[in-house]
Image: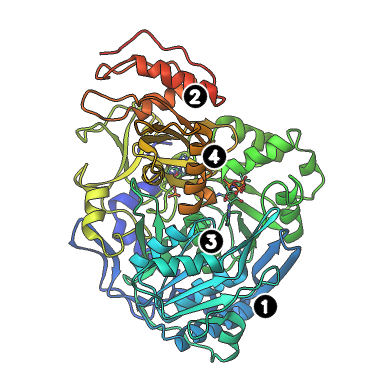
Amino acid sequence: MTATDTSRFSEIYRRSLQQPEEFWAEAAAEIDWIKPWTRVLDDSRAPFYRWFAGAQLNTCYNALDRHVDGGRADQLALIYDSPLTGSSTTYTYRELRDAVATFAGALADAGVQKGDRVIIYMPMVPEAAISMLACARIGAIHSVVFGGFAANELATRIEDATPKVVVSASCGIEPGRVIAYKPLLDAAIDLVEAKPDRCIILQRPQLEAELQPGRDISWADAIAAAEPADCVPVEATDPLYILYTSGTTGEPKGIVRDNGGHAVALKWSMKNIYDVNPGEVYWAASDVGWVVGHSYIVYAPLLHGCTTILFEGKPVGTPDPGAFWRVIEEHGVSTMFTAPTAFRAIRQQDPEGEHIARYDLSKFRILFLAGERCDPETLHWAERKLSRPVIDHWWQTETGWAIAANCMGIEPMPVVAGSPTLPAPGWDLRAVDAEGNEVEPGQTGALVVKLPMPPGATPTLWNADERFRSTYLMSFPGYYQTADAGFIDDKGYVFVMARTDDIINVAGHRLSTGAMEEVLAEHPDVAECAVIGPADELKGQLPVGFLVLKAGVDRPHEEIVAEVVTMVRDRIGAVAAFKTATVVERLPKTRSGKILRGTMRSIADGKEYKAPGTIDDPAILSEIDVALHEIGYPQTAAAEGPSA
Ligand code: COA
Ligand code: AMP
C-alpha cells in the first residue's frame, strides 16, 4: 500500500511522480482542446508552474456543449432540489447549455469581455451555476462569494477583483428567515472605490429587491434582451475563476484556478477518485461559495457527463434528518460528498438512523467526506448505518481537488479511521520538521507538497505573485506548504491533525481567527484581544473571544460582549458563528509578547496543559481556565509545569 509496493495504485502513483508530463498528457486526452499545448508543464518561471502552456480550450464547452453534441442532450445535467422553498427544477444538458449561452449573452451585453471579472454573490439556486458557466463560456473570470459573508467581506473581494458586473439575487433563504442580499450588496458597493458598471439581480418571489436605475437590471430583463453567446477559446493557463479564502489576516487570498489544468484534473478525479461513471447522479451537498461547490457541484460532474444536484437545504431541519436520504432516493444518487459536520448533525438528531431505513438507497454506492478532519466516531457511525464505504479525503481551496484520498476507481484501500488514506496521484506529499527535513514515519511535521503540484492546483494568487510565494513557497524552498500539520505512517497513510496557522474550521467552513481579532480590536472599549477555536461536538470548532478592556472602562461586560458578537456578525457574517466572548484581566503571553493561543485552546479543550517555559506569568493560565469555566467550558487541571 505504500508508494513502494507493487499494487496497481502504487504503480499509477509512482508513474504520476516519475513521469508527470506523460501521465497528465494522457489524462488530458479526455478533454476537447481547440489548440494543443506546446509544453505539458512549463517550468520556465519556477517556482510558478503552468500546465498545458500554449493550449486553448473552453471549459464551458467541455462541461456542456460537447455532451449535447455527443448524445447527452436529453440527459439531466442539473437537478435543483430546494426544501427551503419547497420547489425543484431540472435542466437537461441541452436546457442548461441554452440557459448558460443566453446568460453569457446577457453578460456580454453588460460589457463583459474575455478576462473581465464577474462577482457572483448568490444563494444555492441554479442561476448561480448558470452564471459561473456563462463566465467560463465567454472567457470572463468569475469570483463567487459565499452568501453567508457580510457586506464588508463582499466589499474586500469586489475591491480586489474589480469586477465589471456583479450577479446577485434578491434574497437567500435560511431555515426560519429570509436574508435580503440587495442591502448587503449595496452596502458593499458603497464601501469600494472601483464600482462595478452593472448589477444583475435575480428576483426571487420570497423577497423582491429594489433596483437602482442605471446600475441594476433584473435577471429576467437581462436574459429577455440577450442573444445566446458562443464559447470563446481561452488559453489553458488563463484564469477560470478566483475564489477568495481566509488567510491569517482580514485580507482574504484570491486563489486563482486556470482553465486547462483544472479541467484535466477534475475530469480525471471523477473516475479515479470517486469511481463515478458518466450518466450517473453525483451529489456534493455543499455550497457553490466554497471550493467543494466549485469543483464538485459545478465543474467536475458536468465535465464528466454526470447529473449534478444543487441542494438548497440543510442536513437537518429541512424538514428532518432524513433530508439527505430523501434526495438520494428521489434522484437516484450514486455518489455523495459532504462534510463530516453534516453527519454529526444528522447523528445528533437521529442516532439510531431510523430515517435512513425509510428510504431506498439501492443506487447509493459511496459516501465521501472532506472539508475538516473526520473524527473516527462519525466515520464509524456512517459506515454502520449506511453499510457502504465511507471515504475521508483531504484537500484545500488552493489545491482544488484531493491531495490525499482512497482512490476508489483505481484500487480501494483498507479504510483507516482518522486518515484520508494515501497521497493521490500527482501529489508528492512529505511531513517535514522546521528545517524542512523529512521526519520519520509516524512523526508529526508540517505537511508539504514537493513542487510542481499537479494540474488543477492554484498557480498563484490574484494579482499577488509575491504573496503567493511568501505565504506558500518560502518556508520550505521547493515545496508548497499546506499549513496543515500531521504525519504519514509506515504504510504511507496520511493523518492530518491540525492547522499550523490561525485558521479554524467551523462546520466545514474555513475562517480566520486573525480576521475576527481585527474586528474585536476595533471595539472602543477593547485594549487587547485573542480568538481561539476550541473543539465543538457539532461544528468541529467554534470561535471564542477573549477581551482585555481599556483601563477605566466600567460598563457591564455582557453589554460589551454582545456588541462584539454583533460586530463580527455584521463585519464577517453569520457564517463566522461567533457567539461567545469573555472579558479577562490579561492574556497569557510569552516574555517576547506572543499570545499563547495554543495553550489557551488546550485549556478550553479540557486537555492537560503545560505552561511553556517562555511564559511571562504562569498564573494567568488559571485565570483563563476560570474565565472559560464561567462560559461553560470544563475546568482543566494544569500539568506539572512550567515546561522547559
Ligand atoms: N447565507 C446566509 N447565512 C448563512 C448561509 C448562507 N448561505 N449559510 C449559513 N448561514 C448562517 C446560518 O443560518 C447560521 O446563522 P445563525 O447564526 O443565525 O443560526 C450561521 O450562518 C452559521 O451557519 P452554520 O455554521 O452552517 O450553522 P447551521 O446551524 O446553520 O448549520 C450544519 C450547521 C452542520 C447543519 C451546516 O453547517 C452544514 O450542513 N454543514 C455541512 C456542509 C457544508 O456546507 N460544508 C461546507 C464545505 S464542504
Ligand atoms: P478549505 O480551503 O476551505 O477547503 O479548507 C481546507 C482546510 O480544511 C485544510 O487545510 C484542512 O485544515 C481542512 N481539511 C479539509 N479536509 C480535511 C480532511 N479530510 N481531514 C482533515 N482536515 C481537512
Residue at the spot of label 1: 74
Of marks 1 and 3, the one in the foreground: 3
Residue at the spot of label 2: 628
Residue at the spot of label 3: 288
- Residue type at mark 2 is Leu
Residue in the foreground of this view, choosing between 8 and 515: 515
Separation (CA) of disc 2 from disc 3: 36 Å
Separation (CA) of disc 2 from disc 1: 58 Å
Return the disc, 1 or 3, that comes first in the chain's sequence: 1
- Residue type at mark 4 is Lys
Image quadrant holding the N terminus, namely top left
Report crowding for label 2: few under 14, some 14 to 19, many 20 or more residues within 10 A (C-alpha).
many
Q: Position of residue 157 (x, y in %)?
A: 39, 63
What kind of element bears circle 3? loop
Q: Is residue 9 above or below residue 132?
A: above
Return the disc, 1 or 4, that comes first in the chain's sequence: 1
Number of marks drawn: 4
Q: Tag on residue 579?
A: 4
Report crowding for label 4: few under 14, some 14 to 19, many 20 or more residues within 10 A (C-alpha).
some
Residue 492, visible in the rendered structure: yes
